[in-house]
Amino acid sequence: MEKSPGKLGRIVLVPCPAQGHLSPILQLGAVLHSQYGLSITVVHTNFNFPKNQPPPFRFISMPDHLSDEDISSNDFINVMSKLNINCKVPFRDVLGNLVQQAGGEEAGVACVIYDGVMHFPEEVARELGIQSMVFRTLCAGNIRIYKEYPRLVKEGYIPVHESKSLDDVPGLHPLRLKDLPVYKLKGYEGLLRLLEKACETGSSSTIIINTTEALDREALMELQKQHHIPVLAVGPLHKIAPPVSSSLLEEDGNCIRWLDKQAKNSVLYVSIGSIASVDEKELIEMAWGLANSKQPFLWVIRPGSVCGSEWTELLPEGFNESIRERGLIIKWAPQKEVLAHESTGGFWSHCGWNSTLESISEGVPMICTPSFGDQRVNTRYLCHVWKVGIVVENMERKEIDKAVRKLMVGEEGEMVRQRMMELKTRVDCSIKEGGSSDNSLHELVNLIPSV
Ligand code: UDP
């Protein structure tokens, strides 16, 4: 398919202010700018406003009226619900100004692309007569559940009873009830309310998803049946976009020099992403599991991610001596670089969707310990469908030690690694010229109105 000619026009991106949401929407913006010539304006909440505002983007901050209590609560559902109410008027002001400024050097606003957990940008765009598209940062296998929740509640599957947790979810193969994001979630009704709204695409013309048919084909087909507008899988965007620096935390580049000194495929990279946390007991089990496995590791302990401590204070006595040079602990990694490094042979992850895509894209097999949200869905696909991961159900040192050895030096690990390489190849094909994601990207650009 031929590339569309450069389009003049401005895309207004409205990210959800969390690392795992911000990066992919900026990657989408970078693709639309670099390959199709569109101008990109990012309208971001004051909360988590990026210190780094990489060109070619123009960033505008918008008041969000979150209280200190909201911010410190770490309650994603509450924060999202508040943003959806508080940001509507400020966003209308910003978008209205952008529309008024258009003309001369300023490109007119062609389209608003907003993160799917928020609905206020769609309402505002509709009121101002501007087209909008919804962008989703999770896999289709997870998004397709949204519309099924009311049925699952009605049929008594939700809330999930522990005795039924291993049962299949009717109509949602390959998921079991314990894979659902609402499993063991206190106040799950709040999530259901948020997702009910997130399902309503309103006047949006298109659903864009950072996934690929190579991973998510069946779920994408199901999603397309649920919606009357095009559902376009255009990912993995980080492999299509020129590099965009979107990290909210400072990356420790020294770990790359440490990786340079390690043997090929020998290092296990460990990270639980930007939101998940562990308690002291889990930290101690992780530490001894890693130490006892005797495998080299690079461990990201994000400041604040261990409950009750600032950083590494709660690591057990004797741990540092026992690992000596074999392990490196850092605060935040340049993760994509780490996964692309030839010394990295495995990724023990919480299985956020970005981490999942980033690991698959580099052919790095995984150990999966999901914590909340879509992470259990991703884990189910990784371990059960694609068979490129090994699950650690309990943060328990013996189970961790066993899984690490199995993946890094065991025969089974070798097979998992091979399957991951095959999966990577299929994903690579989907982003090449004429691949499914490449085609969807052209289709998306053709759907953006000219101004
Ligand atoms: N990440 C990073 N450095 C780290 C840990 C994570 O750059 O030390 C990035 C990672 O590359 C990914 C994002 O943070 O793009 C995490 O997103 P994900 O969807 O995996 O999980 P979330 O943080 O949303 O739970």
Image (cartoon, rainbow, N blue to C red):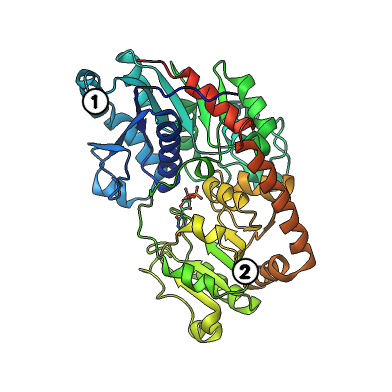
Which residue matches tag 2?
396
Instruction: Judge whether residue 145 can be spotted in this image.
Output: no
Nearer to the camera, 121 or 59? 59
Q: What amino acid type is highlighted by mark number 1?
A: Val
* Left or right of 169 in this view: 148: left
Residue 117 location (% of width, % of height): 44, 33
Instruction: Judge whether residue 258 can be spotted in this image.
Output: yes
CA distance separating discs 2 and 1: 48 Å
Residue 219 location (% of width, % of height): 66, 31
Residue 420 location (% of width, % of height): 70, 52
Instruction: Report crowding for label 1: few under 14, some 14 to 19, many 20 or more residues within 10 A (C-alpha).
Output: some
Q: What amino acid type is highlighted by mark number 2?
A: Glu
* Left or right of 425 in this view: 299: left
Disc 1 secondary structure class: helix
Task: Choose the circle earlier in sequence order: 2 or 1.
Answer: 1
Which residue matches tag 1?
89
On screen, residue 6 above or below 420: above
Instruction: Report crowding for label 2: few under 14, some 14 to 19, many 20 or more residues within 10 A (C-alpha).
Output: some
